Amino acid sequence: MKNELLRRIAARQIVCGVVGLGYVGLPLAVEKAKAGFKTIGFDIQRKKVDMVNAGQNYIGDVTDGDLEMLTKTGMLSATDDFGFIRDVDFIAVCVPTPLDSHQQPDISYVRSSFEEIAKNFKKGTMIVLESTTYPGTTEELLRPILESGSGLECGRDFYLGFSPERVDPGNLIYKTKNTPKIVGAVGDDAAEVISAVYSAVLDGEVVTVSSPAVAEMEKILENTYRNVNIGLVNELVQLCNKMKINFWEVIEAARSKPYGFQAFYPGPGIGGHCIPLDPYYLSWKAREYGFHTSMIESSMMVNDRMPEYCAERAGQILNRSRKALNGSKILILGVAYKQDTDDYRESPAIRVIEYLERAGAKVDYYDPRVKEYPERGEMRESLPGLTAEALGAADLVIVTAAHTELDYDFVQRHAAMVFDTKNAMKDVKVRDNIELL
């Protein structure tokens, strides 16, 4: 089976499937189709399916022309019928893995996807989970689901692996195509054929590790590393505020050291799908072994509190102007979790707004990339434009996403006070109405 699959992979004769057509899945599906593999994408959202089939792009990391060309030539199509699994040889699962209301892993999307796959896949299929999860998921949860649901044996009748997604929305250098890929699989044969598929699709190096658990832990390490270091700088920026030291200047000075230091930056919190969530997966799994990840949990506490801290700082700034937070007009600049993207998943800016409104503030926001976002069952809309009138009407302007297309000199000229939580206004010369986080 292995040799036959390797032959068909080299000849571009296998059909690839991607479950989940979001920020991870759609770029991956596009790259597979561009590499010469007929690719079928699946999503439960009919709107996404229809858009893909019409060649209409909705993901920033996908080129409009690529998607249109691939759908027109039949190399890429989409469906909301799980029966498509019967027609594919390689399946990559890229579904959400959020936290539940108790901050514990919610892998219901992964579980339900694999239950459907188990009903439909054929002998000789390669199946890979790309969604971030806790170590042990692939072998302890997914393998039994596939074997019991299909009657097939892993390693003999099908191949199973884990290859963590590495997507950085808005990154101008590293995309799906050129980012190195990690593969951990159940058995050497599985690792070889799964790695062969990714090597045929991607330009980045494919790194094979000894097991899915190693690959799962590797992904957790990537983002926990960032969470801990962001927690460190978020704690130090609070201390430096009390000491009246510009911590942003401290970081720039430290960056001059050519070894032993990597710059991380403070902000109103952390957002996106991975960094705010992945450490919870690890700390939850660690408790199974009677182990407490004290350093990780401490950084999570610091980062989780940053939106509330920023709201408190906003109140302190207003107090110096003899204004109360209750009743003040506040303008938020940017609700995306990251500059120059439209991605507001787990955005700390949204939590800052919530804390401000709980205190009685009247809050508007402007984001040139996020025109609206869901809030308590309704859509909250951005101001249509950033005008002198809107800036002047606000008692305080808070920069919570450092979008580079904004004119920060214009903001400074027309705002009464600015609280810059991202150092987005570092190049503005006149600073008498700007306060840094």
Image: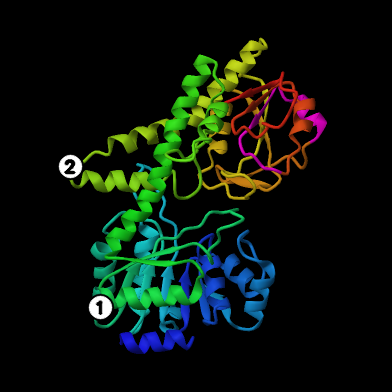
Distance, label 2 to label 1, CA atoms, is 32 Å
Q: Earlier in the sequence, mark 2 or mark 1?
A: 1
Most foreground residue, 35 or 350: 35
Q: Is residue 131 above or below residue 105?
A: below
Q: Position of residue 150 (x, y in %)?
A: 28, 79
Q: Is residue 389 magenta?
A: yes
Q: Is residue 85 left or right of residue 284?
A: right
Q: Are marks 2 and 1 in contact (CB under 8 Å)?
A: no
Q: Position of residue 406 (x, y in %)?
A: 73, 40
What is the crowding at mark 1: few (fewer than 14 residues within 10 Å), some, or many (at least 20)? Answer: some
Q: Position of residue 422 (x, y in %)?
A: 60, 34
* Element type at mark 2: loop
Residue 262 appears anywhere in the view? yes
What label does residue 290 carry, if any?
2
Amino acid under disc 2: Gly
- The image quarter containing residue 1 is bottom left
Q: Position of residue 245 (x, y in %)?
A: 54, 19
Please state the extent of the stretch shown in magenta in the rendering: 387-404
Most foreground residue, 148 or 293: 293
Name the residue: 36% across, 56% down: 107
Q: Is residue 82 magenta?
A: no
Quadrant where the image shows the C terminus = top right
* Element type at mark 1: loop
Amino acid under disc 1: Gly
Q: Is residue 108 above or below residue 311?
A: below
Residue 100 appears anywhere in the view? no
Residue position marked by numbered label 1 in the rendering: 155
Name the residue: 55% across, 61% down: 175
